[in-house]
Image (cartoon, grey):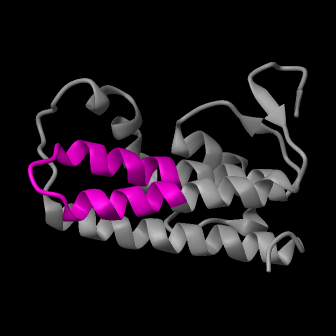
Amino acid sequence: MEMSPSKQEMTFNRAYAAELLRIAEGDYSTALALQKANDIRIENAFYMAQQAIEKALKSVLVALGLPVPMVNDLGILIARIPAAHEPPFGYELSELNQYAAIRRYEEGQWTPKVEDFSSVLSKTRLMLDWARSVQVSQNLAP
């Protein structure tokens, strides 16, 4: 791992992409478990889905040999992905950014519903599959 000149980005060995995607899969598994739990704060489940998507995006940047911005903003990460590898849903998933920031510390005007979360989980699964396909195209994953 080495810092790029801006110090707000890091460049990683491309082999790290697979490890990062495994961590993203773990976050997704945690989100699934939270979906089934009783008496939870649903924002925490959304947070785990956001984390899985964030790490999937970062794994793609690593797989492509690109610097990774050290941010949690999905929109910034998506903007760094080359058009040839555009992720599913484009910038639509940026709405999950609120769960990586303010919604972790306070309840908002809108209370998410379990039904909304099912849709987010489906999209998260597709994002993880997309990230794996990019790694395969770069000869980094089986």
Q: Pinpoint residue 68: horizontal percent, then vertical percent.
A: 75, 39
The answer to whether one can see residue 137 in this image is yes
Residue under the point 63% across and 45% down: 77
Residue 137's place in the image compared with 62, above or below, is below
Residue under the point 39% across and 56% down: 30
Q: Pinpoint residue 62: horizontal percent, then vertical percent.
A: 80, 51
Q: What is the quadrant of residue 127 in the picture?
A: bottom right
Instruction: Tell me: 78 left or right of 91.
Output: right
The verdict on residue 103 being magenta is no
Instruction: Tell me: 72 left or right of 97.
Output: right
The answer to whether one can see residue 91 in this image is no
Q: Pinpoint residue 50: horizontal percent, then vertical percent.
A: 43, 49
Residue under the point 31% across and 50% down: 46
Q: What is the quadrant of residue 115 in the picture?
A: bottom left
Instruction: Give the quadrant of the N terminus.
Output: top right
Point out the stretch of residues depicted in magenta: 26-52
Instruction: Tell me: 88 left or right of 140.
Output: left
The verdict on residue 32 being magenta is yes
Residue 94's place in the image compared with 105, above or below, is below
Residue under the point 15% across and 62% down: 114
Instruction: Tell me: 11 left or right of 110.
Output: right
Q: Main secondary structure of the magenta part?
A: helix
User: In this view of the protein, which residue sits in the foreground, 130 or 90?
Assistant: 130
Q: Pinpoint residue 126: horizontal percent, then vertical percent.
A: 51, 74
User: In this view of the protein, which residue sits in the foreground, 88 or 46?
Assistant: 46
